Amino acid sequence: MQKLLRRKTIIVGADQPAEHRLTPTLSWPHLLALGVGAIVGTGILTLIGVGADRAGPAVLLSFGIAGVICACAALAYAEMATMMPASGSAYTYSYAVLGEIFAWVVGWSLILEYSLVVSTVAVGWSGYAAPLLTPLGFPVALTEGPQLGGVINLPAVFIIAVVAGLLMLGTRESARLNTILVVVKIATLALFVAVTLPYFDSANLSPFTPFGFAKTVSPDGVERGVMAAAAIIFFAFYGFDAISTAAEETRKPERDLAIGIVGSMAICTIIYIVVAAVAVGAVPFAHFADSPEPLALILRDLGREGVARIVAGAAVIALPTVLLAFLYGQSRIFLVMARDGFLPTALARISPRRGTPVRITLITAILVAIIAGVMPIDAIAALANAGTLIAFIAVSVCMLVMRLRAPDAVRSFRAPAAWVIGPVAVAGCLYLFSSLPARTQHYFLVWNGIGLVLYLLYGIRRSRAG
């Protein structure tokens, strides 16, 4: 039991051994763009349609609920990140505050989250790229995984390789490109709002809650309701947690991490609410419910085919920024786990030329490329939400524990009303978890069961905590 609950002593970046030390090159604009780049992606481009199918016009309420819960978690992240400016995000905070076994569960959940997000987004990007490649003679069998009758999804593997190459080239260079692409995405969404707003009709908002508030199973077997939609739309909001993995590469973490985390959540919440309101008000929700490209479909319904093509094309730009943020975050979590002995410590070595963890980034890219290229992920993609909810709960609990354990510790950012937002984040995440599909909950428990077996057989003996 003593081993299970041993806590890690946090070593900030400047005190790491030279071969494991990351180079601080980022400032708050880079972090803000990293967060917005991670959050604004497949969520806003596709989940409005999924949410409308589950909640009708009340998808606006679903966005609001998911946004409030994520905002509370974001405030907890901001406080913990500035108190412990070290890579690893929720895994590191849990190790330092709650103990090793909790850190392992959180780290294992983050591996699930990041791997599935990167793989799913890569496959989504391939869906846009494949129609452009096949007319040129590119084999269809190389654009689909075995589950669809193909051999390998080569475009998905390709885009992962490109993003991983950027990350290995240098963190600052990647951040600059990400910032440019984020500006393009926001401009595209602003164009959608400007074109669609004149068509807003309040009659499209009635009835507002056709499927009720709580999760219920419809006659067609689909789980619907405001909370069922919120549990799925939650996917659209997370991504700010990737910012906390950049702590050791931030020049002024005590200031910039809080700006990046809270700022990106505030910006994206406003964007989501405005875009969702305009979308639902422009046409009846049934017209775009469950559509894979709801914004483009709405524009086509309004006779704006040219703008629809622009918005659809923006998905090709949007998705690589999500890949960059999550692949970056996953590689940094793996880096810290290697430092802690849960992975071979040689993987934690930093390239002296680039100042980046080239080895661990390459291993991470290979892992997610295998998933994206050959494995069926459509049935288990919602597992990413489950893993994230566990991480959010852990960080919120860590914030509350530290308020009791070290009330006078230096906090360059203090979450307001901590004893309100902390319990709201925990309760909200638990409720969202209970609103996930039952199959997702089952798969998540199986995943963590496997993780605990690995920890007891391997991790507990390799740990270097002390």
Image: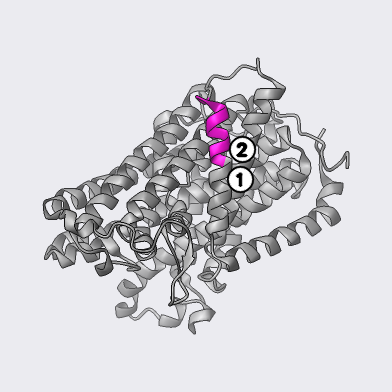
Quadrant (top left, top right, bottom left, bottom right) of the N terminus: top right
> Dividing the image into 4 quarters, which one contains the C terminus?
top right
Q: Which residues are magenta?
A: 415-425
Is residue 399 shown left or right of residue 42? right
Task: Tell me the residue that label 1 is attached to.
Answer: 391
Q: Magenta segment, principal secondary structure?
A: helix
Total residue callouts: 2
Please give the name of the residue rendered at 47% of the width and 57% of the height, measured from the top-left corner: 214
Residue 374: quarter of image = bottom right
Query: Are discs 1 and 2 less than 8 Å apart at CB?
Result: yes
* Disc ID at residue 395: 2
Crowd around label 1: few <14 · some 14–19 · many ≥20 (10 Å): many
What amino acid is at disc 2? Val
Near-viewer residue (313 or 439): 439
Q: Is residue 422 magenta?
A: yes
Q: Amino acid at mark 1?
A: Ala
